[in-house]
Amino acid sequence: MQRALILTIVCAAASIAHATPGDDLDKARSEFLSGNFKDAIPLLNYLLYPTPRLAEPDDLVEAHVLYGACAFQGGDVSTARLEFEAALSMKPEYAIDTNRFSAGAVHFFDDTKHDLEERMKRDAQERALADEKDRLRRYRESLVVYEVRPYYVNFIPFGAGQFQNGEHNKGLWFATTEATTGAVSAGIWVYLVASYGFNGRVKPEDVGFARTLQEVEIGAGGLCLGLMAWGIVDSLVHYHPRAQVDADDSLLPPDLRKPPPPPPKSSFYITPAIVPDGMGVVLTWEH
């Protein structure tokens, strides 16, 4: 009798010791279907963490879903969402129904699935955009673009040569000073011609004033010509037939260029409104 009892205990211990992960999953499934969620959670946690003990992918997916459903039924929606997402990340098309799960769990699973799909779409778009930006950056860095600078531009006044050489502040200074002195000289000449004619017949009482204006006119004109000559010499000193410049989008291949933005859409709305004598409608047009 004692030997039979010992043999029974040994057989039971051997049975427990040789329980496989598949057996544990069957037991967890049975506990879940019986509504014993608290008893199913430790079994499922053992099968999944810290390292999965289930070899079949379908078994892993089911274990995560059962774990999530048990957590949901226990009010732990954070764990439920994590487990559902873990299952869907392995099998995105997975679905559950009310044959085995509660309506609340099915609804929560579907919401989690929809949120995960949207997040994956956003992540995919962001990765595609980042890849496109990196591709564009690497392509631009590989380009070596030179701008050809015509020689004759050096002889154009008002800072044209300086602007071509990339010296914008200097070009602006030459353009301003040359335009100012030239305008002063030309303005005085126009005034003298309008006042005394082309023959320059000046009244005796206006001789001093007219002579002063002529001196200012000649001085301003000479200064303007001097500035022009200085600008030409300066432009020639700093002239380079070509210069390396940054590449712009016009030099990119068609598949790397940004598509033009879509034209704005017009919208027409009809909204009901209350008026003193009854009901009416409000017409709204947006462009």
Image: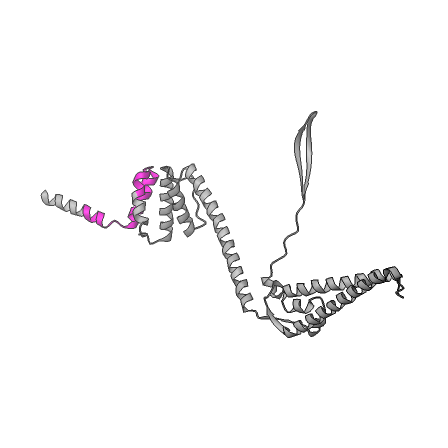
Q: Main secondary structure of the magenta part?
A: helix
Q: Nearer the viewer, residue 23 or 164?
A: 164
Q: Position of residue 257 (x, y in %)?
A: 60, 61
Residue in the picture at 37% in, 53% down: 57
Q: Nearer the viewer, residue 153 or 72?
A: 153
Q: Is residue 241 at least partly visible in the picture?
A: no
Which portion, as a residue range, is magenta?
12-41
Residue in the picture at 31% in, 48% down: 47
Q: Is 260 rendered above or below residue 5?
A: below
Q: Is 115 rendered above or below residue 260?
A: above
Residue in the picture at 44% in, 40% down: 108
Answer left or right for 196 relative to 234.
right
Residue in the picture at 44% in, 45% down: 95
Q: Is residue 27 magenta?
A: yes
**Mark count:** 0
Q: Is residue 250 magenta?
A: no
Q: Nearer the viewer, residue 95 or 157?
A: 157
Q: Quadrant of residue 68?
A: top left
Q: Is residue 39 at least partly visible in the picture?
A: yes
| Quadrant (top left, top right, bottom left, bottom right) of the N terminus | top left
Q: Nearer the viewer, residue 163 or 196?
A: 196
Q: Quadrant of residue 156?
A: bottom right
